[in-house]
């Protein structure tokens, strides 16, 4: 694919700075730029590469960042680059096919234009919507429902009675509907509580690789529409996550906790059980949530508190060494004074 800078600019509603007829053949990283490609600059960390990159054009928010190079001005370079990547590298369109090496059990209903790859297992009474793709060796348990336009990559385990909405993407190695960690200690043993609930996943959700989403003990574990889940995330039984949340790698939430809408959790955040977190909350990396928290705030630390309080506490801790050194100096002065 070859496009001029003007054609790309029209596609992303930008403004060309420089040669509108410059031909672009692909996309590259700004720090590893390739002649003939376009790149983008959004994070200030990469500003130092704007003058040295070999890319032929740069997408920026501020014309001053171009350093005399060709480019396109947009309000959000990251969004623009996402659109350009789809333009230059569209997803391959596959022909509908149910491979004969797949196993489809009785009463399963498969929609139109579905792709089922070799080794996939589709259980009894399963419903699969139109244009959905089921990857190699992925297993879908009995009475589960998969919506339309979904992509379930290879080696995924969907247990019985899981409901997945439309436009959902699930990456390899993920398990949805496994038993929650429900045990009651009795004397020297631990009695397992039957996990008879289900999992409901909304529309346009994306779930990374090697995640684990437990079914509810009773009722439902729920993931809201538009929520995006990174790799290596654990969601325990009866958890409810609202619409449009971002859960990044290493996030773990214990049973029966509830998260509002549009919350953001950085890497390795942990949430204790039976808590409620308000909508539009943001949690810094490695925060530990030990109590219910209001929405619309940014939190950090363990236990998680508003970030300004956390930073104030850290500043006090960091000042301890200075205070200790000052005290030692005073002690030495006092000793010399006494000796004199």
Image (cartoon, grey):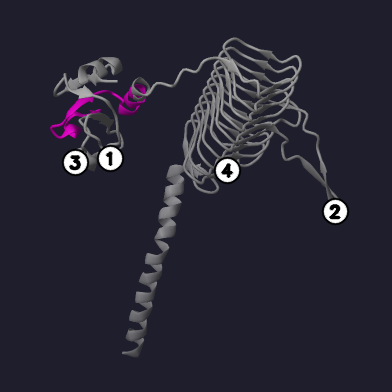
Horizontal side, residue 117 vs residue 106: left or right: left
Quarter of the rendering containing residue 145: top right
Quarter location, residue 214:
top right
**Residue at (25, 28) in percent of width and height:** 59
Query: On residue 102, which mark appears?
Result: none
Q: Nearer the viewer, residue 265 or 7?
A: 7
> Which residue is identified by label 4?
270
As for residue 75 lying within the magenta part, the answer is yes
The residue range painted magenta reads: 58-84
Disc 1 or disc 4, which is closer to the eye?
A: 1
Q: What element carries label 4?
A: strand
Relative to 110, say whether 267 is above or below: below
Farthest residue toward the right? 187
**First in residue order: circle 3 vs circle 1:** 1
The CA distance from mark 3 to mark 1 is 10 Å
Seen from this angle, which residue lies furthest front?
100
Quarter where residue 133 is shown: top right
Residue 52: numbered disc:
3
Q: Earlier in the sequence, mark 4 or mark 3?
A: 3
- Residue at left 36%, top 70%? 326
């Amino acid at each position: 694919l070859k496009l001029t800078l003007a054609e790309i600019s029209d596609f992303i509603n930008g403004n060309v700075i420089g040669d509108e007829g410059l031909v672009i053949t692909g996309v590259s990283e700004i720090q590893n730029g390739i002649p003939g490609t376009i790149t983008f600059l959004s994070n200030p960390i990469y500003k130092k590469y704007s003058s040295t990159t070999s890319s032929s054009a740069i997408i920026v928010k501020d014309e001053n960042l171009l350093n005399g190079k060709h480019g396109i001005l947009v309000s959000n370079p990251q969004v623009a680059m996402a659109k350009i990547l789809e333009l230059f590298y569209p997803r391959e369109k596959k022909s509908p096919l149910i491979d004969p090496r797949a196993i489809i059990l009785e009463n399963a209903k498969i929609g139109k234009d579905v792709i089922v790859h070799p080794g996939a297992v589709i259980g009894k009474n399963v419903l699969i919507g139109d244009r959905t793709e089921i990857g190699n060796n992925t297993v879908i348990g009995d009475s589960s429902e998969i919506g339309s336009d979904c992509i379930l990559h290879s080696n995924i385990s969907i247990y019985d009675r899981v409901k997945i909405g439309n436009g959902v993407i699930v990456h390899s190695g993920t398990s949805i509907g496994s038993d929650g960690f429900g045990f009651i200690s009795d004397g020297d043993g631990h009695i397992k509580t039957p996990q008879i609930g289900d999992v409901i996943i909304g529309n346009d959700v994306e779930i990374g690789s090697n995640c684990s989403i437990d079914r509810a003990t009773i009722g439902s574990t729920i993931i809201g529409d538009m929520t995006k889940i990174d790799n290596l995330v654990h969601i325990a039984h009866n958890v409810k996550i609202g619409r449009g949340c971002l859960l990044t790698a290493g996030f773990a939430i214990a049973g029966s906790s509830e998260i509002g809408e549009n919350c953001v959790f950085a890497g390795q955040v942990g949430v204790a059980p039976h808590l409620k977190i308000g909508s539009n909350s943001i949690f810094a990396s490695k925060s530990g949530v030990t109590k219910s928290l209001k929405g619309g705030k940014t939190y950090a630390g363990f236990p998680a508190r508003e970030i300004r309080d956390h930073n104030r506490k850290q500043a006090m801790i960091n000042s301890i060494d200075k205070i200790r050194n000052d005290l030692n100096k005073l002690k030495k002065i006092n000793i010399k004074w006494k000796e004199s």
